[in-house]
Amino acid sequence: MLFPTFTFAAFFAVVLPVAWALRRWPVPWKLFLLAASYWFYAAWDARYVLLLVAMTLGNAAAAEINQRASAGWVRRTAVAGGVTLSLGVLAFYKYYDFFTDSFESNFGISSPALDIILPVGVSFFTFQAISYVVDVHRGVTDKANLLDFAVYLSFFPQLVAGPIVRATEFLPQLKADKRPDRAEVAQAVKLIGRGMFKKVVIADFLARAVVNDAFAAPGEHGALDMLAGIYGYAVQIYADFSGYTDMAIGVALLMGFRFPQNFDVPYTADSIQDFWRRWHMTLSRWLRDYLYIPLGGNRRGRLATYRNVLITMALGGLWHGAAWAFLIWGVYHGVGMAAERWRGDANGGDARPTANPTSRNGSPWIKSDTARLWARRFLVFHFVCLGWVLFHSEALDRTGEVLARLFTGWGTGPDLLNPLVALAIVAPLVAQMFPRAWAEKGSKTLENTPVGLTAVGLSVWIMVVVALGPEGVADYIYFQF
């Protein structure tokens, strides 16, 4: 059940008013949220609702034992059991074929062939379950009752593609009887409208107009088409994923829940580390708090820090998919981040100049400073785009074909690139450079608009988006993760 569809609109048109009607009675309200979330997930494959239930019961039991036990070894065993359950589910469904194929090709060890269907969103709800069990063990959050935890793990707006919401961010909101005020409704409408436009008009159009064809048969297209395909995919994956999270955050806000931000104009980043502070921010923070810091972070010297960065990013790459390309993509970013740290260490500090917009005497930035800032942004953007080639190809030989065509395809004219494709690529990149104050002005205008007029405006906007977008809505890219 995809957000920008009439099926979801009908589902949400029932869920939203019923949920608010039940809000004054906490237990029926939570039971309804749980039932609605399971219905939402069952629309994809009803069998995997049982997996979600099993994950809920297993991790709830681990947290219960962890909080009740007085012996340290019992508490450690409980948290280890919960984490093992979550990682075991993730490994089986996501990596079984990957590891068995690798063992068979490298060592001649064969394993039973299983027809495994990857559950949608398994990477997201397993990471939420892990963070909950670990946070209970650390004393960061108290154990929730079973119903609250079940709602937290299955809440439909973020169930299948994030953002990754922590228990500390979600559970307190189940106890607060707070309806969204006018500003929050305006923000929700803006996010839903913006997310739909990103997904339907930008992402789906670029996929069908240039990206799919360019990557499917690089030998049949010229260098300009391949550049358009690479840049187009950079915009497509951003518009697709951030469009989903915009809608997820907006839908949750209408339900009375605030989710953390997941994207912050990532293509304005002026370092690789800065990119990961802006891209899929909830995953970046999860990897930092539950992997990088437990590995030792930057507390054990430079070499250990570089090692921890590489391990974290490699596993972060593997989280995205069961393919060597994803692992290498993670290592690629890890090497880039380690190199930045090494450069900063060699310079006695940060590898980048300060982002302070004024010099020491308070005068505006001089042109050379501005030029260096844009040069860093240019280099980081192309570093990321090169990684996206590997990410999309999912195979090293196909990556090589795409990159080779950039050098050998200049004798072939473009057949995919046209003014509309160029506009769909350039406009979203330029929009990320707009001052944040511009967006805030738009939000203020929505806040001052009557609710009825806002609803009519959103309806008209949805019709415009449907008219501008290609026929049908493609699955979200991150559904496969």
Image (spheres, rainbow, N blue to C red):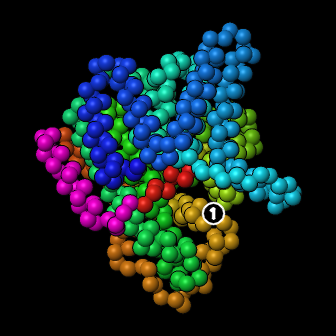
34 or 422, which lies in front? 34
Image coordinates of residue 3 in percent, x first then y, are: 36, 49
Q: Amino acid at mark 1?
A: Glu
Prevalent SS, magenta region: helix
- Quadrant in the rendering for residue 236: bottom left
477 or 336, which lies in front? 477
Callout 1 secondary element: loop
Image coordinates of residue 70 in percent, x first then y, are: 68, 9
| Residue visible at 37% across and 28% down in the picture | 32
Q: Is residue 247 magenta?
A: no
| Residue visible at 70% across and 42% down in the picture | 308
Q: Is residue 101 above or below residue 418?
A: above
Left or right? Give the position of 235 relative to 468.
right
User: Hey, which residue is sitting farthest bottom in the picture?
Assistant: 411
For the question of whether residue 35 can be seen, the reply is yes
Residues packed near mark 1 inside 10 Å, few (<14), some (14 to 19) or many (20 plus): many
Q: Which residues are magenta?
A: 449-473
Q: Which residue is mark 1?
A: 394
Image coordinates of residue 247 in percent, x first then y, are: 36, 46
Q: Is residue 453 magenta?
A: yes
Q: Is residue 232 above or below residue 458?
A: below
205 or 8, which lies in front? 8
Left or right? Give the position of 224 relative to 312.
left
Image coordinates of residue 227 in percent, x first then y, are: 50, 75
